[in-house]
Amino acid sequence: MNFVTAVKTCLSNYATFHGRAPRSEFWWFYLFIVLVDVVLSFFIGSETFVAIRDGGFDAISVAVASNRAVMVQGIVHLALFLPMLAVSVRRLHDVGRSGWWLLVAIIPLGIFVVLYWWLRPTEPRPNAYGMPPLLPAP
């Protein structure tokens, strides 16, 4: 699965928590989230720079420009939270774990346990969550 296919799949399965997601789908979508965040951070910096350049060091104009950009970033993060959560759960399903195991990431060092499961290869046989994704051609 390539980058574009993974992003399309995750966004089309916006809140689908059943089924399985291969490693490639999960990590390509994770890269997409990081790239979106980098682009939004760039725009926040440029908005602030433009406000400083155009209005001098007027604290109010800088704050308004920065707040507007941060609000856009917050809306984008909220919009992408559900598909990221869904693909994370489907990735856990792919290695034979319940999506509830994602809550382990809340405890200290628990993210490393979840990261280990995210890095594991796909179970090659059907499990309780469905058929293996991306079956090789016979």
Image: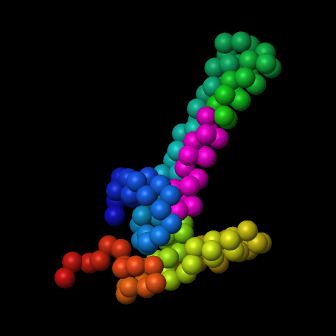
The residue that appears at 43% across and 85% down in the rendered structure is 127
For image coordinates 36% across by 79% down, the residue present is: 131
Q: Quadrant of the C terminus?
A: bottom left
Q: Is 77 situated left or right of 128 in this image?
A: right
29 w.r.t. 117: above or below:
above
Residue 115 in the image, given as x and y percentages of width and height: 60, 73
Of residues 102 and 46, the one drawn nearer to the viewer in this rendering: 102
Please state the total of marks drawn on the protein image.
0
Q: Which residue ends up furthest to the left in the rendered image?
A: 138
Place of residue 7 in the rendered image (x, y in percent of width and height, measured from the top left): 41, 54
Q: Residue at x 21, y 78 (%)?
A: 137
Q: Main secondary structure of the magenta part?
A: helix
In depth, the one of 10 and 36 nearer the eye is: 10
The residue positioned 57% from the left and 78% from the top of the image is 98
Quadrant occupied by the N terminus: bottom left
Locate residue 106, reporting x and y percent.
73, 68
Is 40 situated above or below 119? Answer: above
Colour scheme shown: rainbow
Residue 59 horizontal side relative to residue 99, left or right: right
- Outermost residue on the top side: it is 55
What range of the chain is rendered magenta? 72-86
As for residue 9 lying within the magenta part, the answer is no
Q: Quadrant of residue 62?
A: top right
- Whether residue 27 is visible here, answered yes or no, is no
- Between residue 61 and residue 93, name the one nearer to us: 93
On screen, residue 136 versus residue 81, left or right, reads: left
The reply to whether residue 6 is in sight is: yes
In the displayed structure, 102 sits above or below 45; it is: below
